[in-house]
Amino acid sequence: MAQGTNSISSPVRIGICAPSTPFTRDAADRVIALAAETHPQAELIFDEQCFFEEGHFAGSDKQRTDSFVALANDPSIDAIWFARGGYGAARMAEAAIEQLDGIAKGKTYLGYSDAGNLLGALYRAGIGEVTHGPMPSDIGRPGGEHAVRRALDWIMNRQKNVLEPGLTNGKKYSAFNLMTLAMMTGTKLMPDLRDHILIVEEISEYLYAFDRAMFHLCSNLAAQGLSGIKLGNVGDVPENDRPFGETPEAITKRWSEINGIAYLGRAEIGHDVENRIVPFGLLKL
Amino acid sequence: MAQGTNSISSPVRIGICAPSTPFTRDAADRVIALAAETHPQAELIFDEQCFFEEGHFAGSDKQRTDSFVALANDPSIDAIWFARGGYGAARMAEAAIEQLDGIAKGKTYLGYSDAGNLLGALYRAGIGEVTHGPMPSDIGRPGGEHAVRRALDWIMNRQKNVLEPGLTNGKKYSAFNLMTLAMMTGTKLMPDLRDHILIVEEISEYLYAFDRAMFHLCSNLAAQGLSGIKLGNVGDVPENDRPFGETPEAITKRWSEINGIAYLGRAEIGHDVENRIVPFGLLKL
């Protein structure tokens, strides 16, 4: 076997940082134990920064930036895995991207939710294989080991059976949390989504807030030449004082139609253990 | 006294519609009773649409559009007062503005919160005297009669003592709820705020969501030549599982500075009875 190829004898080193909120050592230990069983060739490197705490965040904006940049620019690290979401990546993504070098371009970057700020900014900059999928934090969900294992199946083996089942070879994709992407429009983190199928999911938002974010997102994307929009899971919708009167899918269809965007149906991504893998850009398998 | 001037014998007819969520007859009766005492020349006309209910909204998108357009284009109505916020004006504002005629241009439009979608769209279109201030719904707050009275003092008499106390003659202003304006950026409702001092307020948002909305708003306004930003009240902030670590003012200062926007201090607007009047555009008193 050629040198430099990942073989049975060369581990894949996965660097893990927390661009948003703090992770716990206990959860990290559980992810490491699971990976040792299911993917013994994976070497999980949880940066100490994952466990920092400063107010809402996993350390200061600078600490979260530095941790990500150090891992991304480290030639001994093969892939970057974002530990969890919450909120915070929007505060460090622009500065972080500016500090990445050539080494960072050869890596896979995996995460979702608030980490979408980094996925978007990396994709905008043309850096790495940007991928929407489960994070170490999913270990905390009932059945979460399936989600974590799916992420490792992709990072380690590019297993096709972990991909979002509606993905089609030869088409371009991106995937985001709706609110995260809505707040990225017009900022320096927003990638060009022309000719892409955009998949969005949402969690823990009132339906009126979902409608408002969809108004904002579809209005902003109307002139951008999207190939279409698909809707992932919309989970844990809080009860309002009265029913909203429309489903998330009806809301998505309405705002898509008003803005001349094709609505292409449902997709299997979301804040849950069924969250499947969506690699950004042209799908070539 | 010249004909056509509002005098002791000519009432001012104020048309009230609900572009967002339903009002109640009981609250309408209380506002009418209060006005009869304090502003006997004001004739309050609550359109029946205020009491419609369809899911989350005060009637369908079309009913809310039609009610507003009919009042705005009615030559016998002198001013338009939005009954309450909630969510919904973003779904009808664009269609409504397209249907306004010359009659609509001569009126005052008053409201805040979700009604900001209409304030913004009217101001963008150069229609009427667009004004941020209390609504009939404020009657439901303890001491709310002071807020309602302030709105009538402005509509009826242009009383200077009800203006936001930091306003300066010769400067341009606009005022919005932060989340409402954040979701208007890049849409057909967003007015040009060049050379304006923008005042924003917020209610019932976690500080991480406030930070995210401020990231979005300031990033989008960075290149637009604002004269500066002022922060109104930030009320009813929900408790998160841990302290955010920054005050709303520190958050506003930070995102303003990053985006080259002057931070100009605090202002007296908000979802409370102290909510003062901010006429949009050049202040000439």
Image: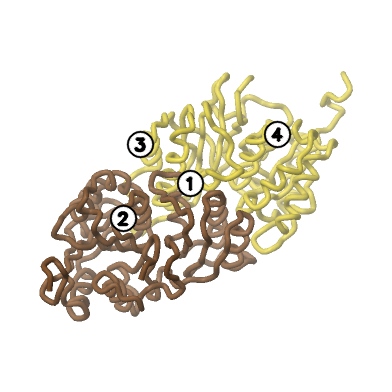
Chain colours: A yellow, B brown
Give the number of the mark in front: 2 or 1: 2
Q: Amino acid at mark 4?
A: Ile
The structure residue drawn at horizontal position 46% and vertical position 48%, both measured from the top left corner, is B185
Q: Amino acid at mark 3?
A: Ile
Residue at mark 3: chain: A
Query: Which SS class for mark 2?
Result: loop
Task: Give whichever of A185, B262 is nearer the camera.
Answer: B262
Q: Which residue is mark 2?
A: B20
Give a yes or no on whether discs 3 and 2 share a subunit: no
| Structural distance between the alpha carbons of marks 2 and 1 | 25 Å
Query: Which SS class for mark 3?
Result: helix
| Structural distance between the alpha carbons of marks 3 and 2 | 19 Å
| Structural distance between the alpha carbons of marks 4 and 3 | 33 Å
Tell me: B67 left or right of A49.
left
| Structural distance between the alpha carbons of marks 4 and 1 | 31 Å
Answer whether residue A25 is visible to the viewer in this image: no
Q: Position of residue B94 (x, y in %)?
A: 32, 45
Q: Are marks 3 and 2 in contact (CB under 8 Å)?
A: no
Task: Give whichever of B153, B68 is nearer the camera.
Answer: B153
Residue at mark 2: chain: B
Query: Which SS class for mark 1?
Result: strand
Task: Give whichever of B15, A177 is nearer the camera.
Answer: B15
Q: Position of residue A217 (x, y in %)?
A: 46, 42
The structure residue drawn at horizontal position 30% and vertical position 47%, both measured from the top left corner, is B92
Which disc, if any, is residue A235?
1
Quadrant for the N terminus of chain B in the image: bottom left
For this orientation, the residue located farthest to the front is B2
Q: Which residue is mark 4?
A: A127
Which disc, if any, is residue A258?
3
The structure residue drawn at horizontal position 42% and vertical position 44%, both measured from the top left corner, is B187
